[in-house]
Image (spheres, rainbow, N blue to C red):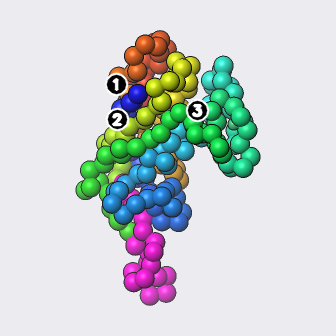
């Protein structure tokens, strides 16, 4: 099943390069934010919320280092070595004019370095974008709720280095009771 998410940057968001999110998996055709980076931030946000007691009824081993991950609710939903997980993020749509591209500047000459592989994109504040969270059809209501909670807490966490985003999910998957997550249907930071 598909959960469509509308999001917007609250401050400028840096993508790519070697200092921030998406350093290895950003493709040159894909402008902006890699889905895998959003998924990673969702995972971190819900892990923190569980550890800090904001969310009860779910377990989290709290690990982001794959070799140390142990079986827990967060790992079962988001995946860990040899376990695929039930959620993926893709289809990030962002207006090209919202993205500024930087190249590496040589500190000595203050000129752009010709052969630099460094490429960094900066997404302007207050840029709206969309992405798709795909959840396996056999997921339980409890697992889907963990995915929605991870989106909820992503609004209080960060994407990349200090990037804050707001987001909302206008339509929840059918067949489960998510009535205590109604506020996820509206922007949080307005
Ligand atoms: Zn775990």
Magenta span covers which residues?
Answer: 103-123
Q: Which residue in the rendered view is the most extreme toward the bottom? A: 109
Question: Mark 3 or mark 1, which has the lower sequence index?
Answer: 3
Q: Quadrant of the C terminus?
A: top left
Residue 86 visible in the snapshot: yes
Query: In what element is the residue under mark 1?
Result: loop
Q: Which disc, if any, is residue 85?
A: none
- Res 153 visible: no
Badge 2 crowding class, 10 Å Cα cut-off, few under 14, some 14 to 19, many 20 or more, is many
CB under 8 Å between discs 2 and 1: yes
Does 190 appear above or below 91?
above
Where is 58 relative to 27, above or below? above
Magenta stretch encompasses residue 118: yes
Marks 3 and 1, how far apart at CA = 22 Å
Tell me the distance, in whole angstroms, between the alpha carbons under discs 2 and 3.
Answer: 22 Å
Q: Would you name the residue on which mark 3 appears?
A: 77
Disc 3 on helix, strand or loop? helix
Pinpoint residue 178: horizontal percent, then vertical percent.
Answer: 47, 15
Q: Which residue is tagged 2?
A: 6
Q: Nearer the viewer, residue 114 or 175?
A: 175
Q: Earlier in the sequence, mark 2 or mark 3?
A: 2
Tally the marks. 3
Counting from the top left corner in percent of width and height, residue 160 is at 51, 51
Residue appearing at x 71%, y 34% in the figure: 71
Q: Residue at x 50, y 42 (%)?
A: 39
Q: Which residue is mark 1?
A: 170
Question: What secondary structure prevails in the magenta region?
Answer: loop
x, y (%) of residue 8? 36, 41
Q: Residues within 10 Å of mark 3 (few under 14, many from 20)?
A: many
Q: Position of residue 13 (x, y in %)?
A: 43, 53
Secondary structure, mark 2, is strand
Whichever of labels 2 and 1 marks the residue nearer the N terminus, that label is 2
């Amino acid at each position: 099943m598909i959960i469509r998410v509308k999001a917007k940057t609250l401050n400028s968001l840096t993508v790519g390069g070697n200092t921030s999110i998406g350093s290895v998996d950003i493709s040159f055709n894909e402008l902006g934010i890699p889905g895998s980076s959003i998924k990673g931030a969702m995972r971190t946000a819900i892990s923190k919320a569980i550890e800090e007691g904001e969310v009860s009824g779910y377990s989290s081993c709290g690990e982001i280092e794959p070799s140390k991950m142990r079986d827990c609710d967060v790992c079962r939903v988001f995946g860990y070595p040899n376990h695929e997980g039930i959620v993926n993020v893709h289809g990030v749509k962002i207006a090209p004019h919202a993205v500024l591209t930087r190249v590496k500047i040589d500190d000595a000459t203050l000129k752009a370095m010709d052969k630099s592989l460094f490429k960094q994109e900066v997404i302007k504040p207050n840029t709206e974008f969309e992405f798709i969270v795909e959840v396996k059809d056999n997921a339980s209501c409890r697992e889907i709720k963990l995915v929605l909670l991870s989106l909820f807490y992503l609004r209080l966490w960060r994407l990349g280095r200090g990037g804050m985003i707001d987001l909302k999910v206008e339509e929840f998957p059918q067949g489960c009771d998510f009535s205590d997550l109604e506020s996820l249907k509206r922007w949080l930071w307005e």
